[in-house]
Amino acid sequence: MRATKPLLYILVMGGVLLSSCANYHVRKGEQAMSLLAYSKAEKHFEKALKQKQDRSLLIRAAETESKLNKVEEAVAHFAAAEASAPLTGEDAFQYGKLLMGLGKYGQAEPFLIRALEESPERRDAVELIGACQGYRSFYEDSSRYDVTLVPLEGLASAYSAIPFGNGLLFAAQRTGSMGSRDPWTGHSYTDLYQAELTTDGIPSSPTPLKGAVNGAYHEGSAALSPDGRTLYFTRSNYYGKKLLKDKDNISNLKLFRATLGENGEWGNISEFGYNSDGYSVGHPALSKDGKTLYFTSDMPGGLGGKDLWYTTDNGTGWGAPVNMGITINTRGDEMFPSVVGDALYFSSTGHNNMGGLDIFETHREGEFWSEPQNMGYPVNTTRDDFGLWLDSAGTKGFLSSSRSGTDQIHALSIHPPTFAVEGIITDAKTGEAIPGATVTLRNLNTKGERTVTADVDGNFRFDLEPNTPYFIMADAEGMLSQSTPISTVGLGLSTTLRADLQLEPLVVDKPIAVPNIYYDYDKWDIRPDAAVELNKLARIFMDNPRITFELSSHTDSRGGDLYNLVLSDARAKSAVDYLVRQGVSPERLVARGYGETLLVNGCSNGVSCTEEEHQANRRTEFKVLFRNGADTVQP
């Protein structure tokens, strides 16, 4: 009994020491997090978790790993915390986003829904839930893009490449730095570098940008003026070697300008007039004329997170910043803008998103911007994709991505989207294919035409040009010709359109019913729903310019015979007048009202019939009267 007491004492004291050790690492980890030293915080939380599996500690570890882009590790710790008790609020939202980062959209959606149910006003949750449900659309046009890694020697990370001289200018961190290290990652602070490119696009060994741009802390993404002699760049808020922080212990970013000296070095550095110690300003982009400066900021007046803003050159300096509004900005983060013509490219954690930051494209439409479109895979992945630059043709450029685990620069080639139209020509009566039908495609911009012959199954196909309206016409022996409009105007993704055409047999003096043409009681005005069908009929009449048609109207047997005859005649004339207004030649149309004289069933005067049976008699029909001089118009 006495022998067990020392052992019990050892076990108790061992447990106390382990707990004390874990608490020490928790405190040190939280201190490191408060200083944004995530690399150091991660090590402390790892050590603490070896001593105890505490739910709040699992969440803190996941938050730290998320900051370091260690998505798999963060997901594992959030999953362990969820197993202990359901994640709520922001934790559920962040877990959902991380699951999206692994491409696990089905698993992510319930956590995003949970976050939305707790905060129904969260637009960012709504957008990401939609992305989870429609994620397949991100892969629809992947063949348009070629994305290849740009190997940059000796760098831990690199991003935001822009052309500079015969090469590139970009932001990067060195590996194994012997000097000051970024506490967030453990690598060197980010500086601006340059690298020459060979004709094959292979970069030389990167060297720091010449001059006084690089300092003691971070320098980030940059933009060049049109003449290449003014550089706008992002920099940490520091003075000398002292990093300046706000009341929340955050060092905000600022925007600076430098000019190129005659000695090839950058100097004469000055601050952007709307910088602040209380919020960040950075990620500059310039319009082609250099008169509009776009940037990222979380300054007051935004919509949440980091927003895109712009300012214009008023001749004496940059005017007051303007928020780009709800079409562009979300509750999430919008960053890294770039401009090509009337197109604006930017990255966002909101909108219709694959996960992390995605690159979006929007176009100026007068005073407004079009709805941003996700550029899809492989421009975007489930990780962070940002820092896009494109040439003036919009076909080649560079993007930055953490798809390989760290931020790296990739070369991008964009092939124009491809468009086509396919269809089948069939008999409207039998549904059978019409082999050998002649199909003509007319370009409404150039008026040029192409013709193909439908195959044995009635199939045809044409390649189409972008942003072009067309008409397709189908002709076959013994059939009424028919056309339909198609268009690639406004289509951004490669698309194969469908245009199936059903041809009516061309039989003289045989009525063909026109469905869904109705009139109000005791009236002959053309209703909107009738106009839709008459527009289709007008197309058929204009597609067959050598044919004269009769358009007839019929009533049921209810009402006086003479009254029905007059009413049907008025309706037929009203329909013909409408067709003439749509462009059909009046010489090719004959209006006839038959009243109740040509009933299609036995519902004549005095016979009890259902409303459906009476409706069958209230109809509009057309028939061929005259064709190529071979037939004569009925008297």
Image (cartoon, rainbow, N blue to C red):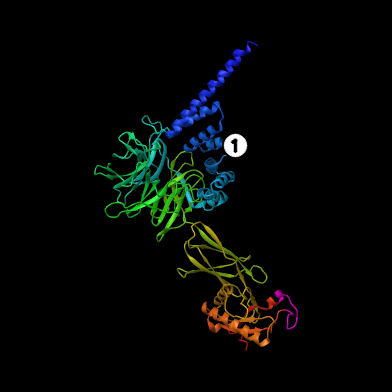
State which quadrant residue 367 falls in.
bottom left
Looking at this view, is 307 or 171 the one in front?
A: 307
Kind of residue at badge 1 = Ala
Location of residue 253 with respect to 123 vertically, above or below: above
Kindly give the residue lying farthest to the top in the view shown: 2
Q: Position of residue 301 (x, y in %)?
A: 40, 50
Looking at this view, is 527 or 594 the one in front?
A: 527
Q: Main secondary structure of the magenta part?
A: loop
Location of residue 442 with respect to 604 vertically, above or below: above
Is residue 498 rendered to the left or right of residue 336?
Answer: right
Residue 611 within the segment the image draws in magenta? yes
Q: Position of residue 634 (x, y in %)?
A: 63, 87
Location of residue 452 with respect to 239 vertically, above or below: below
- Circle 1: element type: loop
Q: Name the residue beneath numbered marker 1.
A: 85
Graded by Cα atoms within 10 Å as few (under 14), some (14 to 19) or many (20 or more), the crowding at tag 1 reads few
Residue 220 within the segment the image draws in magenta? no
Q: Position of residue 80 (x, y in %)?
A: 58, 35
Decide if residue 319 is in sight here: yes
Image quadrant for the N terminus? Answer: top right
Q: What is the magenta range?
A: 601-613
